[in-house]
Amino acid sequence: MSKKLVVIPTYDERENVGPIAQAVRQHCPDAEVLFVDDNSPDGTGAVIDALCESESFVHVLHHGEKGGLGQAYLAGFKWAIERKYDLIFEMDADFSHDPAELPNFVRAAETADLVLGSRYMNGIRITNWPLRRLALSKGASIYVRLITGIPVTDPTGGFKCFRRSVLESIALDNVIANGYSFQIEMTHLTWMKGFRIGEVPITFEDRRAGYSKMCGGIFREAVWLVWKLALRNHFRRRPPKS
């Protein structure tokens, strides 16, 4: 049986960490959870510490000052690689990613090296978003595919499952993105290395508690990152032949 770890970055998520950990355990009983907390001022780290004392499947990595989404995930990936987890998941703490979908990722990972949860596979699967945010997200997906050629329906999504071999093959210290564009870069790196990418349809629901961390700087980073990825790969629109 494969060892599974769900990596969940947190910043001011004290209301969500307990329920999301229990939901992961309910829907994927053999998975463990690693919270990577960026010194949340609302005391999220202390809540997770208490969870770790009572639940053996919960772990925490206190990541210091707020370093951004990408740095939190990279720290979690390195932690997972060191401990030889086979399947390493990314998901949000706020229930916008439904833990009930985890078994679908596990099944898809039997034939894929990276599994993406797609909000745009077989239609639009997003609830409780204003039209402006939906248009921005959908437009970003089209923008990324147009410039890079990456053949996935939702390159900006953050609900994923990596095989450890993928993460071991990527020079994690050289990943340049840190905001939500981190998701684009990791998928692009995986694709360019010739790994198999699969997608499963998910329904994305806006957060139940807390507040969004999206800001203008994160959006601008994503706009320019796509061109950096294209330039870094000499505008190649498919993986190099092995």
Image (cartoon, rainbow, N blue to C red):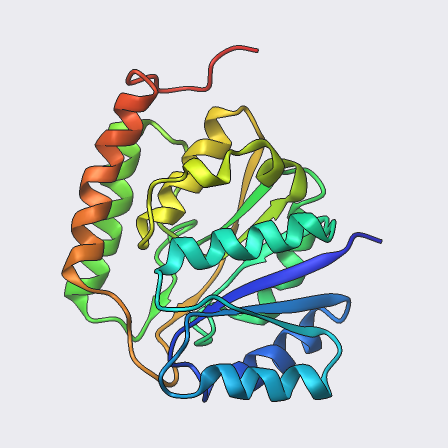
Of 68 and 181, the residue lying toward us: 68
In this rendering, the answer to whether 20 lies above or below 86 is below
Decide which of 62, 57 is in the foreground and name it: 62
For residue 225, side relative to residue 120 (left or right): left
Q: In the image, 203: left or right of 142?
A: right
* Residue at the far front in the pictured view: 64
In the rendered image of this protein, does residue 156 appear above or below residue 190? below
Can residue 119 be seen from the camera position used here? Answer: no
Residue 134, horizontal then vertical, whole percent: 23, 61
Visible residue check, residue 151: yes
Q: Is residue 52 left or right of residue 185?
A: right
Residue in view at x 25 percent, y 51 percent: 138
Task: Determine the image quadrant of residue 205.
Answer: bottom left
Instruction: Find residue 129 and report its horizontal and vertical position in percent.
Output: 26, 71
Q: Picture quarter containing residue 235?
A: top left
Q: How many marks?
A: 0
Residue ID at (68%, 53%): 106
On the picture, is 103 further left or further right than 235?
right
Q: List x then y, in percent, for residue 116.
A: 50, 48
Q: Quadrant of the C terminus?
A: top right
Identify the residue at horizontal 50%, vertical 34% (top origin).
171
Vertical relation: 54 (above or below) 10: below
